[in-house]
Image: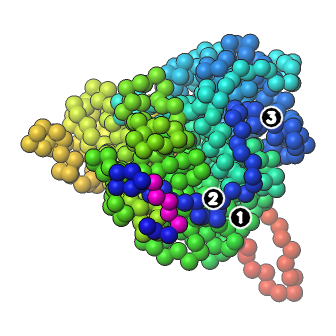
Amino acid sequence: MIEGQEAIPHAGAIYVPALADPALRPRDADVAPDACLHELFAAQAARTPDAEAVVCAGESLTYAELDARANRLAHHLRRLGVRPEVAVGVCLERGPELVVALLGALKAGGVYVPLDPALPAERLAYLAEDSLARAVVTREALAGRVSHGACVRVDADAERIAAEPEDAPRSGSRPEQLAYVIYTSGTTGRPKGVAVEHRAAAEHLRAMAGRLGIAPGDRVLQFASCGFDVSLEQVFFPLLRGATLVLRGPEPWSAGELRARVRSLGVTVANLAPAYWREVRAAAGAEAALPGVRLLLVGGDVLHAGDARAGGTTRLLNCYGPTEAVVTATAFEVAADFAGPLVPIGRPLPGHEAYVLDARGAPAGWGEAGELYLGGVLARGYLRRPGLTAERFVPDPFGGAGGRLYRTGDRARWNADGQLEFLGRTDFQVKIRGFRIEPGEIEARLLEHAGVREAVVTAREDATGDACLVAHYAGDAPAEALRAHLAACLPAYMVPAAYARLDALPRTPSGKVDRAALPATADGAFPARSYEAPVGPVEEALAESWAQVLGMGPVGRGDNFFELGGHSLRAMQVISRVREALGVEVPLEELFERPVLADFARGLETAARAEATAIAPVDRTAAIPPSFAQQRLWFLE
C-alpha cells in the first residue's frame, strides 16, 4: 500500500487517499451545522455586523446592511408566493444588488436560479420557464429580456421593498430542500438544471472555507458569472466566514487590469480559469503574477504544467469538480518546485469521495485509466428529469456516506503519489476555455435551421493552437446565417467559430457519423465576409495584430473581432498588443463595445489625443523630448 493511503477492503480494494495536502487540512475544530445557507450567513452577520461584507466599484455594505436588505427583499418575495422549493430567477449584473438578491431568494425560502443578463433572450426565457420561476429579480433596464412570473425590479420597486421589515422572515426551509439550480449544457438540445440542496451546499462550503483558512481578514474576489457553479464558492466562502466579498463589477478586466485591481483592492484569495490565469502570468512577466494574493484556486479546465507557477508567496490549488458534485470535489496544491508532465487534480475534499472504475464497474488498479465516479456531497439530481438523474446518479456499491455515485464521464487514474490525474472525456463533451459544452445541444439548434439537414459539432485546434468549436453540416445554409441563428439562442461561448459545409457527413459501416473522418477545418470554414482594406497606420497595425491573435488571413476594417472567432482571452491579447505597440492604454470593455476594427481604431485615436493633453513638469535646462503621448499622436496622424 502506498504510504499515506487508507485501504477500504472491497473487490480489488478501493484506495481513498488520506487528506495530506496542507491546504486541505482543518483550520479549526468547528463542524458544519445541519443548517441552510441563509441561516449560516445570518449567524455570521450577527457575529460581525459592522464588518465589511461586500465591496464593488466604490460601494460597500456591512454584514448588518446586507442582512437587512436581503431580509426586506425576502419579505417582498414571500408576498409574491415564494416558498420552499419555489424558484426565483435572478437576472442582475455583478454588484451588491446581485448578492442581496441571492440571499433574499434563500431567506424567502426559495430556490435561486441565476440568469446571466449576457445570455440571449431566448435562452433566458427558457431557463425561467423550465425552472418554473415564481418571480424574477432584475432591474428596469433588463426587465424586458426575461418576462416570466412576477417581475421584481430592484430599482423601480426600491421604495416598496425598502418599506418591508428588516428582520428575517420565517422561510420554512429545511436542509433537505433546494437552495439553487444552475443550468449546464444538455445533450438533448436544451440546458439541464442541476438542483442542489441546502445541506449539500452548506456542508461543502462550510468545510472547504474552513480548510482553506478563509478568515475575517481575507478579501475574496468574485470573478465568475453567477451562471457558473464556481460563483457559489466565490460568493459564499467569504460571507460564511466573516471575510469581505470583492465583486469585480459588470465590466470585463484584461489581465493587466486584474493585476492592478487585485493590488488596489487588497484581494487575498482569488479563483481563475486556467486560460485566464495563463494570460495573467504572461502579463506579469518576471514579476509575481498576483502580488498580495495568498491563495489562488484554478479550476474549470486543464491546468498545464507550464502554468503551474504562481510566484511570490501565492499558494496555488488546482481544483476539479462538476456542477453535480457541488462545485469542487478534489484539489491539488502545486508545490513551488513542481515539475511533473501532468498537474494532478488531487484528492477528495472533506465530504467528497472519488473512485476510478473500469468498464465493469470494478476499481481500476493504480496507474490504470478508468471513469471517475464521485460520491459524498452531491446534487439532488437534474430538475424534473428523473430518467437523466437515474442515468448519471447511480447506487453506490461501496457503502459510501451518500449512498450514490455520480458518473462524471471523465477519464482519470491514481498516480504513484496517490493523486488523481485527469485524462480526458469518455464521451463527446468538451471544454472550451473552462466552459463545459455538450455538442449535442449545439447540433440540435443547428438542425432547427431550414438550411441544415444534419450536423456534428467538434472541438479542434485552430491556427493559434487554441481549442475552438467547429460545426460540420450538410445543407445549403451559408455560414453567416448559421452563426446568426446560433448567436440568437446560445451563449457566445457555445457559438462555433468555424463552419464546414459538406455534401454529406461521413458514416461508419454501421451508419453512425464517423467523427474521425470529418475533414480538418479549412480557410473557408469561417463565415464569408466582404473584405475592405484597412485605412491608415492605426487600422493597418490593428488588422495585423488581429490576424496574428486570431491565426487567420487578412483582416478588413469592417470585420467584427468576435465574429472572426475572437473571445475574451484573445481580446486581452489584443489590448496587450495595443499597449506595447502604440502605447495606448484602453480598457478591455472598449473592444467589447467597439468590436468592428474601424470603430475600435477610432476609439484608440480618441484615447491617444486625450492622453496628449496631459501636462507634466520637465527639466527646462535640457532639451525637451516629445512625450510618449505626443509621439503616439504623430503616429496616429
Instruction: Magenta stretch: give its range.
Output: 4-8
- What is the three-letter code of the residue carrying label 1? Arg
Q: Could you tell me which residue is drawn at 86 percent across and 82 percent down?
A: 619
Q: Quadrant of the C terminus?
A: bottom right
The mark that comes first in sequence, 2 or 3, is 2
Q: Residue furthest left?
A: 509
Look at the image and tell me whether residue 599 can be seen.
no
Q: Could you tell me which residue is drawn at 78 percent across and 59 percent down?
A: 266
Q: Is residue 628 magenta?
A: no
Residue 294: assigned label: 1
Residue 42: assigned label: 3
| Vertical order, 347 against 376 (above or below) | below
**Camera-nearest residue between 263 and 346:** 346
Q: Could you tell me which residue is drawn at 46 percent across and 68 percent down?
A: 2
The mark that comes first in sequence, 1 or 2, is 2
| Residue receiving disc 2 | 24
Q: Is residue 7 magenta?
A: yes
Near mark 1 (Cα within 10 A), the count class, few <14, some 14-19 or many ≥20, is some
The mark that comes first in sequence, 1 or 3, is 3
Residue 201: assigned label: none
- Classify mark 2: helix, strand or loop: helix
- Classify mark 3: helix, strand or loop: helix
Position of 144 with respect to 490 (left or right) is: right
Position of 353 with respect to 623 (left or right) is: left
Q: Could you tell me which residue is drawn at 53 percent across and 22 percent down?
A: 131
In this view, the mark in front (1 or 3): 3
- Classify mark 1: helix, strand or loop: loop
C-alpha distance separating marks 1 and 3: 27 Å
Name which quarter of the figure residue 142 lies in: top right
In this view, the mark in front (2 or 3): 2
